[in-house]
Image: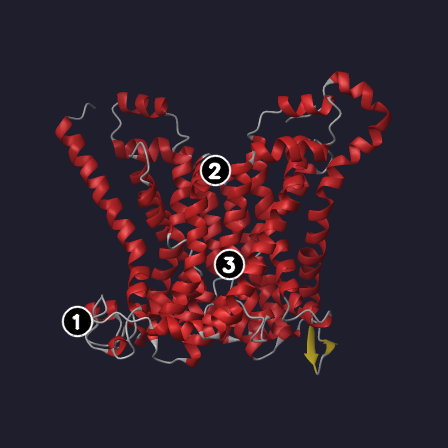
């Protein structure tokens, strides 16, 4: 099966063309949202619709910056997502280390149970969690969101982190243990630096997930000052019937921080993922 | 299995603290286990309890299996399950097939252009609610950009106006959002397929298609299973995209949306909990079936 040079060039052309097509499809809805967000209120209800604004205006953003979305919701989203992601990593690293390095009775069963928790949908526990939160008077707090996010994020965190800790050679740790370093010291001084791409990947995935989380938030948060951005956006849809440019500006404001975080951390993320951070 | 973490020399030193050392994994696991116990296991048990009760004026009244009986007589619930099934089947199949295709395309290249990769991952960083909002705008019946392009095909009517049309939009938006992650999962697996195996297959005269289906696919099968499980669970529990895209019209009322409606809009927690339990069992059975398939290898 020797392929000629021309055949190879043709293959590579097809591959590139298809990849560009996939990228365009991926970006198109967001690009259109971005361009719509710079349109004025008459332009969004013009038929037939067109892509770029005829006159560029930031009217939609002015409206958004005066809204509760920017005043409260984005900050709440950040507090919940950032707090939960950090805590998930902090709690999952020792657990993943224990599963990776120690052999103890019940280890396999426990790992299987934790893995199974990933398969249990958030939806299953929501009725009970709502009742619990309302009895503990925790509805409409950042605290309840962080607690639930941490609990739903830990299984996935342990799963990814164990894979990246498994990939670290044990020799250095053994030397450190001989030198009288305790397990926590080993984790702090050796495992965390060596597994950093895995840690960053875990943080990034949890952060993206909880920044975008909607279902738990919409159920636990009814107080306007405590809502997160995704819940606020749904309110927007309901209160501004045809102001699509304002919807789109709101969407862009919600996308921007998490997209920037992704672009900053993408290298570690892609490396960890391609090394098989999430595997069968 | 790495049984021995501690080198023999250190072991004598630590022998006095043997019992403590055995407890080390427990201490390391304790924070996670406590959180999971109180915020995952306890709520699941509590859900089962609620599903056997009816809430009246804040009081729990034991009703046995009445909620489940009500549910099994409820035609709307069966319909919502059917819609869930259509939705999950379509999104899982399309995501896995397209994901494999994109991964194979990316795998043809020796290095990845970071610009492409970021563009490809834009849908992944987007919330389902934002995705729903953006796609709703594309298909808006009067001013939607795509709706206007396709309106000659649909006879001028909005795609939303037809039940299958609304479902189609929800499915497309969901595939769009889940494709990047699935592709990356597959790409990671493809990069671990040894070049030698593929070369020897090529020497045996296997075409690229045969070698993909006969050699590559069996090797990456565990990853395909993981992707299928994740996409299935994601699909079964999808609420945000549907709520924002179609605004809970009957045509797209899947079981998860139905649960949301019953539990929170109508405040019927007993019925909501009963639906949760059924959904949980469906998730569990599907997961076990997939794992079984994988084990058979």
Compute the Cα span from label 1 to label 3: 39 Å
Which residue is tagged 3?
A211
Residue A248 in sight in this render:
yes
Q: Position of residue B50 (x, y in %)?
A: 69, 69
Kindly indicate whether the residues beneath marks 2 and 1 are on one polypeptide chain: no
Q: Position of residue A34 (x, y in %)?
A: 32, 63
Q: Nearer the viewer, residue B31 or A68?
A: A68
User: In this view, which residue lies farthest toward the left?
Assistant: A6
Which residue is tagged 1?
B152
- Mark toward the viewer: 1 or 3: 3
Question: Which residue sits at x=19%, y=35%?
Answer: A11
Kindly indicate whether the residues beneath marks 3 and 2 are on one polypeptide chain: yes
**Is residue B130 positioned above or below A86 on the image?**
below
Question: Which residue sits at x=29%, y=34%?
Answer: B109
Q: Position of residue B75 (x, y in %)?
A: 49, 75
Q: Position of residue A185 (x, y in %)?
A: 70, 33
Dot 1 falls on which chain?
Answer: B
Residue A98 relative to residue B102: left or right: right
Compute the Cα span from label 2 to label 1: 46 Å
**Is residue A34 positioned above or below A202 on the image?**
below
**Is residue B6 positioned above or below B72 on the image?**
above
Dot 3 falls on which chain?
Answer: A
Kindly indicate whether the residues beneath marks 1 and 3 are on one polypeptide chain: no
Q: Nearer the viewer, residue B296 or B100?
A: B100
**Is residue A13 positioned above or below A46 on the image?**
above
Mark 2 in CB contact with mark 1 (< 8 angstroms): no
Element at label 2: helix
Element at label 1: loop
Question: Which residue sits at x=27%, y=75%?
Answer: A44
Which residue is tagged 2?
A272
Q: Quadrant of residue B193?
A: top left
Q: Quadrant of the N terminus of chain A?
A: top left
């Amino acid at each position: 099966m020797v392929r000629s040079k021309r055949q190879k060039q043709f293959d590579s052309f097809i591959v590139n063309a298809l990849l560009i097509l996939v990228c365009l499809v991926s970006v198109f809805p967001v690009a259109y949202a971005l361009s719509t967000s710079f349109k004025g209120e008459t332009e969004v209800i013009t038929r037939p619709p067109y892509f770029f604004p005829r006159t560029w205006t930031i009217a939609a953003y002015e409206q958004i910056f005066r809204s509760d979305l920017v005043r409260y919701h984005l900050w709440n989203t950040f507090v919940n997502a950032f707090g939960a992601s950090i805590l998930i990593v902090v709690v999952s690293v020792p657990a993943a280390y224990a599963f990776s390095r120690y052999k103890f009775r019940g280890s396999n069963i426990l790992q299987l149970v934790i893995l199974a928790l990933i398969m249990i949908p958030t939806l299953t526990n929501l009725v009970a969690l709502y009742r619990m939160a309302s009895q503990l008077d925790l509805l409409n707090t950042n605290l309840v969101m962080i607690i639930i996010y941490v609990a739903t994020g830990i299984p996935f965190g342990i799963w990814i982190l164990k894979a990246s800790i498994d990939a670290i050679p044990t020799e250095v740790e053994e030397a450190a243990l001989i030198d009288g370093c305790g397990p926590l010291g080993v984790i702090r001084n050796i495992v965390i630096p060596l597994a950093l791409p895995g840690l960053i990947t875990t943080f990034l995935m949890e952060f993206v997930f909880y920044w975008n989380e909607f279902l738990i938030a919409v159920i636990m948060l009814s107080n306007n000052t405590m809502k997160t951005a995704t819940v606020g956006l749904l309110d927007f849809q309901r209160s501004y019937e045809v102001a699509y440019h304002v919807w789109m500006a709101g969407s862009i404001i919600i996308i921007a921080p998490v997209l920037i975080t992704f672009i900053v951390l993408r290298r570690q993320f892609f490396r960890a993922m391609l090394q098989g951070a999430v595997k069968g | 299995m790495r049984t021995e973490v501690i080198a023999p020399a250190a072991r004598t030193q630590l022998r006095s603290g043997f019992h403590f050392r055995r407890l080390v994994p427990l201490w390391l696991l304790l924070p996670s286990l406590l959180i999971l116990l109180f915020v995952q296991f306890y709520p699941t048990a509590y859900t089962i309890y609620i599903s056997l009760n009816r809430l009246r004026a804040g009081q729990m009244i034991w009703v046995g299996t009445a909620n489940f009986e009500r549910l099994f007589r409820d035609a709307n619930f069966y319909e919502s399950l059917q819609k869930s099934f259509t939705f999950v089947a379509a999104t899982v199949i399309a995501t896995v097939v397209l994901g494999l295709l994109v991964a194979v395309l990316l795998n043809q290249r020796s290095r990845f252009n970071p610009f492409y990769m970021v563009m490809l991952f834009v849908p992944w960083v987007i919330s389902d609610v934002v995705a729903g909002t953006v796609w709703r705008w594309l298909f808006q019946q009067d001013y939607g950009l795509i709706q206007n392009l396709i309106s000659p095909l649909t006879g001028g009517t909005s795609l939303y106006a037809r039940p299958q049309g609304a479902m189609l939009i929800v499915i497309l938006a969901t595939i769009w959002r889940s494709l990047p992650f699935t592709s990356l999962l597959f790409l990671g697996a493809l990069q671990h397929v040894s070049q030698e195996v593929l070369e020897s297959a090529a020497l045996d005269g296997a075409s690229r298609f045969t070698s993909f289906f006969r050699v590559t696919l069996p090797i990456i099968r565990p990853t395909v299973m993981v992707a299928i499980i994740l996409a299935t669970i994601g699909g079964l529990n999808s609420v945000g995209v549907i709520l924002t895209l179609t605004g809970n019209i009957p045509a797209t009322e899947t079981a998860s949306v139905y649960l949301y409606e019953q539990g929170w809009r109508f405040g019927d927690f007993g019925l909501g909990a009963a639906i949760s339990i059924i959904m949980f069992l469906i998730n569990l059975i599907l997961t076990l079936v997939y794992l079984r398939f994988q084990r058979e290898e």
